[in-house]
């Protein structure tokens, strides 16, 4: 049998750090980074005698995430202890939710590989605390514990095993990221680990009813590695089965450098977590009114923004979808048009050059370093004729490296468009003289030759000449010949 | 009368009448500790020098009018599982032998803001697990009434120190009887408040759903005075409740006329020592004389309370004690190569046998495949126990039982027999399981002169009722005037 006879089955457990100001059970800041163990107190360091107090914002944010993904919000929920030993887990138990999660039974829509709409079901969303971090071998041998992240609130979004390809898994993850960004409950910075996923993969013969045995890859924090890891792991499993072997349920570590999965050696995962209700916290009871209010306060979601772009701005379905795929892009778009008013131009710049640079740099929209008003300024400068589109491209590239006022950039770099007739004429005459063949081609009716001449003039002026004036002047001067 | 024999309210009276200064009081206690501590070994850490210093400072502040608290300058002892900033909190364990807490427990903050002076940290069974204080890894406390006998536990250091006049009063903690049983063994008054009345923040957790901090005092009035300070909702402990403030001192009416007392017959059965039983019967007669209405009833469910208690307490303990892993604080083995060795060897070397027993038991009852049969069932029985008590309190104002089936037993007779040790809790655990308040007060001595304790159980948040009933009885029998610890061998 071949690879094509198999179907891949994927389920994701997405962990998102919530962007509350303080931790889930104490008032330490959740801020990323900082000196090791500087965002800690006796509570999140699990000093003897300390007790957790649930941060109400965490419940509020998780409820928003539940509502935005179509979940039912549980009015009666509780916290449980998940017991295991690891140095990054100071209490030796994680306060999580076991049998009564805050949100259950939701779904999000993605497009499958054929472009058809497909619902991915969400089993549950629960709240829990993040663990700290181990820094290995920083000072000679051994590991050091940094508890700054310990107690940062997380939601875990558990999908049903509804995805059938790595691409679908990526789309689902992107959708979840986008939703969480829109409702502003998580900054979803994957490179900082504030959005990550445990990926469960199994394979089965096409048409089989039973699922195959799954393996789990922990803590995946980029789309690219998720896709690669799923493809690698599915291939590996198919190979094992094809060679008469058996898949065992294991936890794996994806190694991005070798592009392979390995069984986790340091098992921070006990087989038995001995869950039991957290006796230090009272049950979470939510009123109908609380849930209704949360519904009312839910911000505009990507789907509705997309509709608005179609009708309000007359953008195409595809452009609207792309622009709203990330809240950061969408906010950049809306922010820039508010300032410069040129909807078409803003959309074009975002969907062409800015998207291309994001791709080249392999970064996400949330890492765009410049502001929407800086983008608007670039477009205004084009519209005023201060810079050409060619210069604008360079300004955008520069904005990624060194975000500042675009006017400052063009001044510093000397990129202001040459619109002085004398200067333009000088260049035009020089190019005409140097390219007699093109001049005669143009005269002979080959319009394309004019483009070549303008291009040469742009090159000569390092893109600074006003292209409209160049065109006009070339035609005038050639006609004079 | 010696200064150290006085109750706190008597001391307050003498301070008010300028018969005593607070530095004289602290000095008297320090002298007493220097004289008697070697016989009874109540303390893990003594703060005598600091206390004398503090009392002088406090005296100045009082004379300047900077402090107006009526309790300013009164010394106190604190059980060594209650966190005190800058002073060791050991839980009587090798694990925390040198541990200094970076913060104060909420109750310690309350004591500080009243101006009380900490005389030191008191011995206990390791992590509050035990009924004789023999499971302390750091000190062997003796019963002041007979130095060959145990003081009870786990708050044995607190109860013995109050009985031996080494402190005027003390804080204890009670998970299954750890305040009441040692109070009974040492002939003092011990109150376990309703679960949720006193903040647990800063109490090193043994079993979170059962633990409560409470006063151990020479008499009932002192118990009410100290309780007044300890209670109140704490935003750091969400299981502490926001109840309307009651003045427990003014609830001491010296009157029990018409009080309905229930006697659960299961607490007067075969396992109860005959002298204890006889003494309790006399106490019941006394209540009748004082005008209370007494009736026997059946609290059948109580027979399951002990098993329920040990399952729930051990389950929670197995998780609560996980943080003692040798990583951030406390004992770390010298003998390790890999991470697992740190855990295994640190915990093996630093926990005592009883603590290990309970961790193993608790881990077992929470394990998959056993959870339903043990932990879940225990929680269900817990609900039944609560319901049975609720029903009883529809008929009675208080429930009266022995505090312990026996008086203080000889040292080293039960410490190697855990099951027998567990039975010492049989009269007290159901009160914790149901989250109720209970007080133990002395009601006599046996033929060997060892004190016998009586337990009064109240409905949730009805501390006033049991305090008044205890007070009325205390006024009638004058135990403290008739019996005193002898320090005999």
Image (cartoon, rainbow, N blue to C red):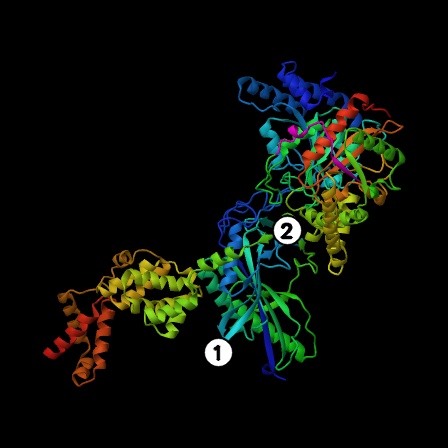
Q: Secondary structure at mark 2?
A: loop
Q: Residue at x 70, y 46 (%)?
A: B321
Q: In the figure, residue B376 lies in which quadrant?
A: bottom right
| As drawn, B139 above or below A332 | above
A271 left or right, relative to A255: right
Nearer the observer, B98 or B259: B259
Nearer the observer, A125 or A47: A125
Residue B78 on the magenta segment: no
Secondary structure that dominates the magenta span:
loop
Q: In the figure, residue B273 lies in which quadrant?
A: top right
Residue B414 visible at all:
yes
| As drawn, B346 above or below A11 | above
**Residue pointed to by mark 2:** A87
A220 left or right, relative to B343: left
Q: In the figure, residue A403 lies in which quadrant?
A: bottom left
* Chain at tag 1: A
If the image is split into quadrants, where does the C terminus of chain A sit? bottom left
A103 left or right, relative to A306: right
**Residue pointed to by mark 1:** A116
If the image is split into quadrants, where does the N terminus of chain A sit? bottom right
| As drawn, A64 above or below B57 | below
* Chain at tag 2: A
- The span shown in magenta is B246-263
Mark 2 closeness class: few <14, some 14–19, many ≥20 residues within 10 Å: many
- The disc, 2 or 1, on the residue closer to the chain's N-terminal end is 2
């Amino acid at each position: 049998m071949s690879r094509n006879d198999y179907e891949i089955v994927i389920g994701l457990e997405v962990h998102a750090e919530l962007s509350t100001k303080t931790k889930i059970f104490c008032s330490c800041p959740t801020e990323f980074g900082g000196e090791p163990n500087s965002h800690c107190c006796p509570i999140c360091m699990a000093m003897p005698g300390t007790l957790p107090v649930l941060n109400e914002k965490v419940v509020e944010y998780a409820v928003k995430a539940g509502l935005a993904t179509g979940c039912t919000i549980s009015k009666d929920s509780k916290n449980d202890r998940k017991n295991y030993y690891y140095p990054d887990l100071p209490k030796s138990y994680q306060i999580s939710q076991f049998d009564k999660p805050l949100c259950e039974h939701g779904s999000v829509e993605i497009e499958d590989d054929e472009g058809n709409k497909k619902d991915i079901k969400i089993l549950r969303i629960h709240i829990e605390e993040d663990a700290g971090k181990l820094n290995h071998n920083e000072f000679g041998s051994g590991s050091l514990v940094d508890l700054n992240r310990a107690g940062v609130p997380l939601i875990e979004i558990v999908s049903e095993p509804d995805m059938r390809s790595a691409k679908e898994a990526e789309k689902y993850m992107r959708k979840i990221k986008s939703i969480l960004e829109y409702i502003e409950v998580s900054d979803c910075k994957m490179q900082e680990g504030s959005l990550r996923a445990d990926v469960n993969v199994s394979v089965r013969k096409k048409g089989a009813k039973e699922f195959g045995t799954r393996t789990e890859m922990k803590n995946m924090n980029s789309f690219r590695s998720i896709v690669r890891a799923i493809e690698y792991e599915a291939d590996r499993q198919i190979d094992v089965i094809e060679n008469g072997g058996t898949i065992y349920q294991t936890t794996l570590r994806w190694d991005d450098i070798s592009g392979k999965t390995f069984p986790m050696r340091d098992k921070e995962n006990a087989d038995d977590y001995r869950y039991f209700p957290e006796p230090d916290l009272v049950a979470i009871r939510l009123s109908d009114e609380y849930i209704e209010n949360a519904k009312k306060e839910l911000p505009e979601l990507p789907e509705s923004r997309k509709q608005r772009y179609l009708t309000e701005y007359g953008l195409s379905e595809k452009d609207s979808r792309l622009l709203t795929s990330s809240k950061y892009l969408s906010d950049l778009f809306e922010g820039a048009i508010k300032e410069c008013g040129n909807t078409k131009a803003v959309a074009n710049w975002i969907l062409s050059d800015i998207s291309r640079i994001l791709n080249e740099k392999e970064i996400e929209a949330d890492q765009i370093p410049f502001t929407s008003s800086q983008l608007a300024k670039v477009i205004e400068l084009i519209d005023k004729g201060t810079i050409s589109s060619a210069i604008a491209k360079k300004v955008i590239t520069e904005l990624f490296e060194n975000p500042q006022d675009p006017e400052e950039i063009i001044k510093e770099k000397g990129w202001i468009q040459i619109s002085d007739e004398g200067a333009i004429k000088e260049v035009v005459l020089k190019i005409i003289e140097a390219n007699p063949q093109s001049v005669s081609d143009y005269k002979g009716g080959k319009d394309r030759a004019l483009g070549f001449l303008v291009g040469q003039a742009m090159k000569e002026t390092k893109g600074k000449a006003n292209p409209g004036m160049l065109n006009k002047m070339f035609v005038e001067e050639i006609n004079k010949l | 009368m010696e200064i150290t024999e006085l109750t706190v309210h008597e001391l307050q009276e003498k301070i008010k009448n300028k018969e005593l200064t607070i530095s004289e009081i602290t000095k008297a206690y320090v002298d007493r500790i220097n004289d008697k501590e070697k016989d009874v070994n109540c303390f893990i850490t003594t703060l005598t020098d600091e206390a004398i210093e503090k009392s002088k400072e406090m005296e100045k502040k009082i004379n300047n009018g900077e402090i107006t608290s009526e309790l300013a300058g009164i010394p106190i002892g604190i059980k060594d599982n209650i966190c005190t900033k800058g002073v060791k909190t050991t839980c009587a364990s090798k694990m925390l032998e040198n541990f200094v807490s970076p913060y104060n427990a909420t109750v310690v903050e309350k004591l500080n803001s009243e101006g009380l002076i900490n005389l030191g940290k008191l011995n206990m069974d390791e992590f509050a697990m035990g009924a004789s204080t023999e499971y302390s890894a750091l000190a062997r406390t003796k019963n002041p009434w007979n130095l060959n006998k145990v003081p009870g536990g786990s708050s044995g250091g607190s109860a013995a120190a109050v009985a031996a006049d080494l402190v005027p009063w003390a804080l204890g903690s009670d998970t299954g009887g750890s305040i009441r049983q040692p109070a009974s063994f040492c002939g003092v008054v011990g109150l376990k408040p309703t679960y949720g009345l006193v903040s647990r923040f800063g109490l090193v957790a043994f079993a979170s759903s059962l633990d409560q901090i409470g006063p151990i005092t020479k008499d009932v009035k002192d118990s009410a005075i100290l309780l007044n300070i300890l209670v109140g909702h704490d935003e750091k402990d969400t299981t502490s409740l926001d109840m309307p403030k009651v003045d427990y001192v003014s609830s001491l009416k010296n009157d029990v006329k018409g009080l309905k007392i229930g006697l659960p017959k299961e607490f007067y059965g075969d396992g109860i020592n005959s002298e204890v039983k006889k003494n309790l019967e006399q106490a019941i007669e006394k209540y009748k004389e004082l005008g209370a209405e007494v009736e026997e009833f059946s609290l059948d469910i109580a027979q399951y309370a002990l098993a329920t208690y040990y399952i729930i307490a051990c389950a929670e303990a197995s998780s609560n004690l996980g943080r003692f892993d040798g990583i951030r604080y406390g004992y770390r083995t010298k003998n390790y190569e890999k991470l697992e060795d740190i855990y295994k060897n640190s915990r093996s070397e630093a926990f005592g046998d009883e603590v290990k027993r309970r961790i193993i038991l608790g881990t077992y009852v929470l394990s998959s495949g056993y959870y339903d049969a043990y932990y879940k069932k225990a929680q269900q029985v817990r609900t039944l126990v609560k319901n049975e008590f609720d029903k009883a309190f529809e008929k009675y104002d208080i429930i009266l039982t022995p505090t312990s089936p026996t008086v203080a037993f000889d040292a080293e007779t039960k410490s190697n027999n855990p099951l027998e040790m567990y039975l010492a809790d049989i009269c007290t655990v159901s009160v914790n399981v149901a989250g109720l308040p209970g007080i133990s007060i002395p009601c006599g001595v046996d033929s060997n002169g060892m004190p016998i304790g009586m337990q009064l159980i109240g409905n949730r948040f009805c501390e006033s009722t049991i305090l008044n009933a205890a007070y009325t009885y205390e006024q009638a029998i004058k135990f403290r005037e008739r019996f005193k610890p002898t320090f005999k061998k």
